[in-house]
Amino acid sequence: MKATVHVTLKPGVLDPQGQAIGHALSGLGFAGVTSVRMGKFLELDLAETDRAKAEAQVKAMCEKLLANTVIESYRVEIGS
Amino acid sequence: MRAAVVSFPGSNRERDIVMALERASGKKPVVVWHGEAEIPDCDLIVLPGGFSYGDYLRAGAMAAHSPAMKELKRKAAQGVPVLGVCNGFQILTEAGLLPGALMRNASLKFVCRQVHLRVEESQSLFTNAYEKGQVIRVPVAHADGNYTADPETLKHMEDRGLVAFRYVTADGRTDPATNPNGSIHAIAGIFNETKTVLGLMPHPEDATDPDAGGMDGFGMFKSLVDALH
């Protein structure tokens, strides 16, 4: 079973990388980009076949390692 | 004072800290590999600077879960003092031994230069050889030193005197222009609740030789030797 994890800085946490990307986009002529937030994307292949169990497993991984919940939030999606 | 220095794959300042500790205490510290489940009996445990696990995922994230860190947490809970410098500070926040987090420098650049620090608290194992308010000059070398914490945690640390060092001008004023990484409240180093754990981004160990970088960082090692004998 596949799982995908998006890790992003929490709202309100300054994201200088996102800001730099936003400036670069406006420099390239892409007008109207009011905000860019940069994050991480992880793809996991799991041996687990039960969706609920897989989701619980991946959430535990996020809490323990994949995200730093002091500054980051995460979103887990379980695929097929 | 017997010290143990934990080394990780990617640590690169362990020799600097070993030299500074030995110069201050006259005793050679033990270097413990991160995969060891035991840290020998000692008066101080040090996490050195470097780039453990190549800073993959987040600086310090992987190192925080190594076997030696389980043992470090156990000993820290018993009151054994712990010092984390640079990557060591990042590991301590990732391991939950210090509050807050260290993010990418606000400038997005690796910063390697001398900075001035104001000693905010002289009543500690780590800083008793300094005067409160004293300004010292030591180097920084990092890309992820931008300290942050939520407002309640910050207020608590400020109220309890748990901010150890702040980035300042040569005459001791905080100024956004002298803050090398964008840290909130210009924080360079913090204590835990019991002031037995200190984490800081600058490298006092690289200011312990009159011929290379000056002696301003030596006070930290002298403090530790005076407090821990």
Image (cartoon, grey):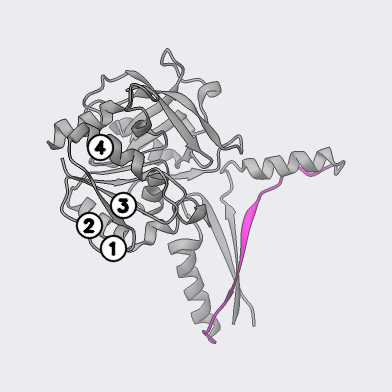
Task: Name the residue at 38% across, 61% down.
Answer: B65
At label 1, counting other C-alpha atoms closer than 10 Å, the crowd grade (few under 14, some 14-19, many 20 or more) is: some
- In the picture, the quarter occupied by the N terminus of chain B is top left
Given the image, on which type of amino acid does mark 4 rest? Leu
The tag earlier along the polypeptide, 3 or 4, is 3
Which SS type dominates the magenta stretch?
loop
Q: For the residues labelled 1 and 2, say whether their Cβ atoms are less than 8 Å apart.
A: yes
Given the image, on which type of amino acid does mark 1 rest? Glu
Q: Chain of mark 3?
A: B
Find residue A24 and report its horizontal and vertical position in percent: 77, 41
Find residue B126 and report its horizontal and vertical position in percent: 25, 33
Q: Which residue is mark 3?
A: B6
* Real-space CA distance between mark 4 and mark 1, rounded to the nearest whole angstrom: 21 Å
- The residue tagged with tag 2: helix, strand or loop? loop
Residue B198 visible, this orientation: no
The answer as to whether the residues below labels 2 and 4 share one chain is yes
The tag earlier along the polypeptide, 3 or 2, is 3
Q: Which residue is mark 2?
A: B39
* Real-space CA distance between mark 1 and mark 2, rounded to the nearest whole angstrom: 7 Å
Q: Nearer the viewer, residue B172 or B143?
A: B143
